[in-house]
Amino acid sequence: MGIDMEVKAIFELPVHIWVMCDALDATYPTGYDKLRFNVVMPDGRPPVGGAPPAPGVELRPKVGEQVVWVKEYGAFIPESLRPATALHRVVVTDVEGPSYDHKSWFGSAAPIGDI
């Protein structure tokens, strides 16, 4: 038995990941085992990228701070991989996975935190 949830969560990577700019502004279906979800990439607007085009995802910067989605740093990038940028945040949506009705903490009614 599966459960469909329209989860929208902003995930901040613990360490930025270098990606080719062609990978930005796109949605990638992925998952692990029976857990399936979409990763929605931000756009590459300078200087720190923009929130992905996922309905319901709003940019909520902390007072006095800029939210960094992607950022270019001084680094050597091979010509064949240019242009590239450092990915800091993504959005996770359309989560599908197994249902554990016997566990009260699991399910679409369970709180997942402030997104």
Image (cartoon, helix red, strand yellow):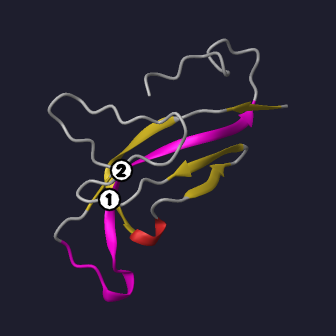
Residue 83: image x %, image y %? 33, 76
Which element carries disc 2, helix, strand or loop? Answer: loop
Which amino acid, by three-letter code, is at mark 1?
Arg
Which amino acid, by three-letter code, is at mark 2?
Gly
Along the polypeptide, which appears first: circle 1 or circle 2?
A: 1
What separation in Å lies between label 1 and label 2 (alpha carbons)? 6 Å
> Image quarter for residue 30?
bottom right
Residue nearer the viewer, 109 or 50: 50
Left or right for 94, reference 101:
left
Residue nearer the viewer, 9 or 59: 59
Q: Are marks 1 and 2 in contact (CB under 8 Å)?
A: yes
How crowded pointer 2 is (Cα within 10 Å; few <14, some 14-19, many 20+) is rated as some
> Image quarter for residue 75?
bottom left
Can you name the residue that lies furthest to the bottom here?
79
Q: Quadrant of the N terminus?
A: top right
* Residue 45 image label: 1
Q: Quadrant of the C terminus?
A: top left
Instruction: Find the magenta span and give its range.
Output: 75-98
Left or right for 79, reference 106:
left
Q: Main secondary structure of the magenta part?
A: strand
> Image quarter for residue 37?
top right
Residue 16: image x %, image y %? 31, 55
Which element carries disc 1, helix, strand or loop? Answer: loop
**Which residue position is annotated with label 2?**
50
What's the residue at 32%, 88% (across, down)?
A: 79
What's the residue at 24%, 64% (across, down)?
A: 72
How crowded pointer 1 is (Cα within 10 Å; few <14, some 14-19, many 20+) is rated as few
What's the residue at 65%, 38% (across, down)?
A: 95
